[in-house]
Image (cartoon, helix red, strand yellow):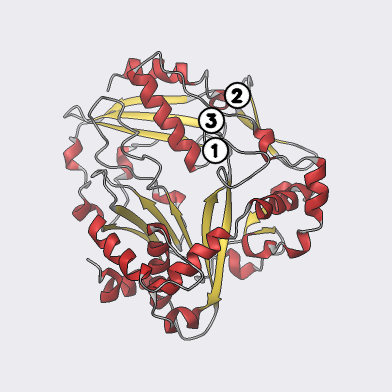
């Protein structure tokens, strides 16, 4: 990977992604976060270093890597966080000529969809300086019109914000407690996922005619994590699923190339005893499918209207319970993680990961794999006791 070409292509990329050089600004009136350009503090951090080890000396094979997701922090493969930099890159060259490229995008600028769109455009520009990406920066698309706002005020009573978003101060101290966690990676092969989906599809609820691989795997994980958790008492178990609203919001339509945050959450709630008692993958896959389907254009507008109505946006928080009763699963495996990250022709990344300090207990991330097939790497974050019980349950990987 040529560093000079990497920098020159990044410089060209900024012409299409100007927010990368901006800084965060919190508006005094309602604490809305905006990105300010042409600020003296703005800019991109780019570091290029060399280290005296070979890339193959790192634990990157799936067998070695499953036990932990942490690469040796002393290698400093990522930049130190800088609150004034929304985008920073660290290029590390190994003795063998291999390269690690750490790309950090502040979440204030964009979501995972935007991140991988940006990386994909950067790789194309690196390969062809004449490439012209198509990017939508019209943030006003997510701002409701006065007519929409008035209409959606009447739907607030049916909008159960307690499920997904809440105003800080309404959260009990118990839900703010953190739990010690560990991170492990589990690879689900294409064949394993196909067998899992076949079983689920054969036992769907009558009102559901199909489910996706995501629906099935999410249901499988949701139930088995609940089985591994403390079952001495009943509790409300919540499954949170981030949903890309680009293809769901109507009038206005959000283009797929919209660069920003266009994610809302669906939430499935059930008694923990139901998860233990109902051993039916098709049933739970149907429930996950129905939960995601509830995030209609009208529901999206209702949620946006509630957010806009809050006088202090800094107090709006994601209502995830940090008391070992919630589970969060997000899918990045359909975002071209590997196939769109090849800066050099024919040279794909051997492993894509993310810093473990950015993860929280009760979360799961679905990654595509270097095989570039339909297999999935599950990055799972649980407390040590729950993780051990999950791994010791033979049904967890019974579709292998």
Name the mark nearer the viewer: 2 or 1. 1
**Disc with the residue nearer the chain's start (3 vs 1):** 3
Q: Is residue 77 above or below residue 272?
A: above
Disc 2, SS: loop
Q: CA distance from mark 2 to mark 1?
A: 20 Å
Question: In terms of depth relative to the viewer, which is nearer, 54 or 108?
Answer: 108
Q: CA distance from mark 3 to mark 2?
A: 8 Å
Query: Can see residue 189?
Result: no
- Residue 224 lies, in percent from the top left, at 38, 73
Residue at x 47% of width, y 23% of height: 133
Query: Can see residue 91?
Result: yes
Q: CA distance from mark 3 to mark 1?
A: 14 Å
**Residue 74 appears left or right of 319:** left
**Disc with the residue nearer the chain's start (2 vs 1):** 2
Q: Which residue is mark 2?
A: 41
Near mark 3 (Cα within 10 A), the count class, few <14, some 14-19 or many ≥20, is many
Q: Which residue is mark 3?
A: 85
- Residue 146 lies, in percent from the top left, at 82, 41
Residue at x 81% of width, y 58% of height: 154
Question: In terms of depth relative to the viewer, which is nearer, 89 or 219?
Answer: 219
Residue at x 43% of width, y 71% of height: 204
- Residue 295 lies, in percent from the top left, at 60, 56
Residue 110's mark?
1
Name the mark nearer the viewer: 3 or 1. 1
Q: Are marks 3 and 1 in contact (CB under 8 Å)?
A: no
Near mark 1 (Cα within 10 A), the count class, few <14, some 14-19 or many ≥20, is some
């Amino acid at each position: 990977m040529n560093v000079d070409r990497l920098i020159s292509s990044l410089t060209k990329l900024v012409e299409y992604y100007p927010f990368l050089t901006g800084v965060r600004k919190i508006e005094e009136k309602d604490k809305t976060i905006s990105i300010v350009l042409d600020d003296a503090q703005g800019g991109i951090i780019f570091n290029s270093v060399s280290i005296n080890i070979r890339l193959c000396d790192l634990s990157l094979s799936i067998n070695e890597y499953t036990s932990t997701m942490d690469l040796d922090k002393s290698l400093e493969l990522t930049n130190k966080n800088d609150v004034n930099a929304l985008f920073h890159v660290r290029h590390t060259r190994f003795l063998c000529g291999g390269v690690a490229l750490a790309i950090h995008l502040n979440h204030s600028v964009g979501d995972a969809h935007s991140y991988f769109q940006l990386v994909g455009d950067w790789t194309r520009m690196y390969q062809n300086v004449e490439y012209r990406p198509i990017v939508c920066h019209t943030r006003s698309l997510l701002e409701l019109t006065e007519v929409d706002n008035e209409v959606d005020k009447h739907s607030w009573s049916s909008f159960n914000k307690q499920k997904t978003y809440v105003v800080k101060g309404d959260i009990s101290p118990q839900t703010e407690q953190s739990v010690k966690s560990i991170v492990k990676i589990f690879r689900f092969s294409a064949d394993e996922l196909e067998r899992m989906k076949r079983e689920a599809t054969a036992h769907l609820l009558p009102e559901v005619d199909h489910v996706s691989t995501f629906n099935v795997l999410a249901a499988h994980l949701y139930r088995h994590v609940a089985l591994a958790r403390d079952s001495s008492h009943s509790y409300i178990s919540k499954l949170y699923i981030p949903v890309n609203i680009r293809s769901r919001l109507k009038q206005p339509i959000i283009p797929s190339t919209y660069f920003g945050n266009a994610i809302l959450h669906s939430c499935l709630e059930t008694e923990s005893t139901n998860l233990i008692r109902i051993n039916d993958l098709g049933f739970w896959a149907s429930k996950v499918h129905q939960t995601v389907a509830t995030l209609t254009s009208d529901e999206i507008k209702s949620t946006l209207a509630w957010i806009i109505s809050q006088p202090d946006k800094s107090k709006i928080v994601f209502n995830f319970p940090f008391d070992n009763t919630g589970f969060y699963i997000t899918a990045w495996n359909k975002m071209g993680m590997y196939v769109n990250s090849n800066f050099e022709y024919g040279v794909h990344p051997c492993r894509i990961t993310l810093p473990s300090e950015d993860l929280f207990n009760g979360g799961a991330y679905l990654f595509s794999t270097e095989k570039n097939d339909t297999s999935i790497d599950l990055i799972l974050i649980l407390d040590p006791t729950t993780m051990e019980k999950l791994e010791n349950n033979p049904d967890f990987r019974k579709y292998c």
